Amino acid sequence: MTGATLLVELLTEELPPKALPRLGQAFSNGIVTGLRTRGLAMADGDFRWFATPRRLAIQVPGVLAVAPDAAVTEKIMPVSVALDANGQPTQALLKKLEGKGIPVSDVAKFEKRMDGKAEALFHTSTVAGAKLAEVLAGIVQDALKALPIPKVMRWGDGDATFVRPAHKLTMLHGTSVVPGSVLDIQSGRSTRGHRFMSRGDIDIASADAYEPTLLAEGKVIPDFAERRADIEKQLVTEAGRQHATLGEYADLLDRSEEHTSEL
């Protein structure tokens, strides 16, 4: 089964500048872990995280719409408790099977093997693979809850809480919007660029088009390291032109705006 690129972006008010790269990495790690745990993304696959003063985002290639079915084996109980002297199911086993929804006819298929010092019955069943459309919103929500944020706030009339008010949620799998709600926001394909240099709301055609679309239409470089390097290059160039020297500026770079206009 072939996957497609997944994009998740949360658009917010200005995030804490010093924590921005840490938030971006933690957000993406949480989402990737959730996808991998459910078999929707490769265990060793690459991904990209993005962070700007007003957004956290991740781009993951090769994500499946539906994970493969999986065989799950569980211990039922010791053979001495499960079967009577004639090899027939005991009341204890019948009660256990009823609770798990396993038909009695499956007992003949149970595997007997040693579990420590006693022989036990094991049952193997096929579990349907997770569907991206059904689990993605929950994965994103869990990733947000796990972020290293000391204080959260509530805004508007809703009950959602986050470090800053959130405005838009983009969840795209290839060219398709993945339905779901996070922080009381319904997912879509619309985002916004720079506050003053952008033309307004921007539609992302596909998950792969995210970065070039934000740059062309939103005047935003979403990649944190790339944006930082671009601004530093401009600083050094301008300092040379002015025959000036730069003092300590690393901290200021981490707080820089999203755009790449010349200084």
Image (cartoon, grey):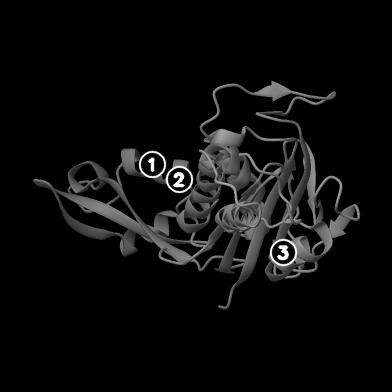
Q: Which residue is mark 1?
A: 96
Residue 63, can we see it?
no
* Point 32% across, 62% down: residue: 108
Q: Which residue is mark 2?
A: 100
Q: Position of residue 7 (x, y in %)?
A: 66, 60
Q: Which picture quadrant has residue 177? A: bottom right
In this rendering, would 44 be left or right of 222? Answer: left
Q: Amino acid at mark 3?
A: Tyr
Vertical placement of 176 versus 30: above or below?
A: below
Q: Are marks 3 and 2 in contact (CB under 8 Å)?
A: no
Residue 247, can we see it?
yes
Query: Nearer the observer, disc 3 or disc 2?
Result: 3
Instruction: Find the distance from the CA under tag 3 to the CA under tag 1.
Output: 51 Å
In this rendering, would 263 be left or right of 251? Answer: right
Which quarter of the rendered picture does the N terminus lie within? bottom right
Q: Amino acid at mark 2?
A: Lys
Instruction: Find the distance from the CA under tag 3 to the CA under tag 2.
Output: 45 Å
Q: Are marks 2 and 1 in contact (CB under 8 Å)?
A: yes
Q: Which residue is mark 3?
A: 210
Instruction: Compare residues 118 and 229 and report the one nearer the observer.
Output: 229
Vertical placement of 192 versus 96: above or below?
A: below
Instruction: Compare residues 29 and 133 and report the one nearer the observer.
Output: 29
* Point 76% across, 60% down: residue: 214
Q: Residues within 10 Å of mark 3 (few under 14, many from 20)?
A: many
Instruction: Find the distance from the CA under tag 2 to the CA under tag 1.
Output: 6 Å
